[in-house]
Image (cartoon, rainbow, N blue to C red):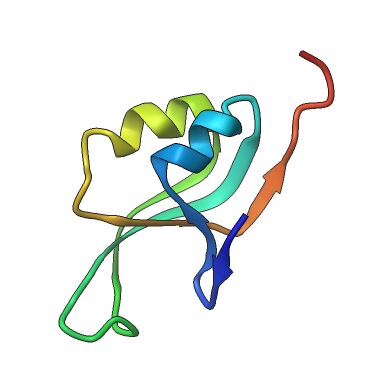
Amino acid sequence: MNKDSFGICINSTMLKKNERTTFTHVRAYQATESELDLRVLLAIPQITGRELLNTIQHSRDLIWRATYQCNAEHE
């Protein structure tokens, strides 16, 4: 999983492999002209990879990050 200064980088490819993972402190940023100046448009306290995948498919222009992840141990 890739990380940057804003947290875990979230994209649909990564979420398809982590549908049962729980992500916390998820944020959706709107990019500005400066990549370091991002505006938070949405914050989600806790969400599964499957739910997040559905959410990001409807908002492709946003940059998604999470602070923590908790992998499911049982299928």
Residue 12, percent from left and from top: 40, 39
Quadrant of res 58: top left
Residue 36, percent from left and from top: 34, 84
Q: Quadrant of the N terminus?
A: bottom right
Q: Left of 1 or right of it: where is 5?
A: left
28, above or below 32, in the image: above
Quadrant of res 41: bottom left
Residue occupying the far left of the picture: 33
x 49%, y 25%: residue: 50
Residue 22, percent from left and from top: 64, 35
State how many labels appear.
Answer: 0
x 45%, y 39%: residue: 13
Q: Left of 74 or right of it: where is 26?
A: left
Residue occupying the far right of the picture: 73
Quadrant of res 70: top right
Q: Quadrant of the C terminus?
A: top right
66, above or below 3, in the image: above
x 68%, y 46%: residue: 69
Residue occupying the far top of the picture: 75
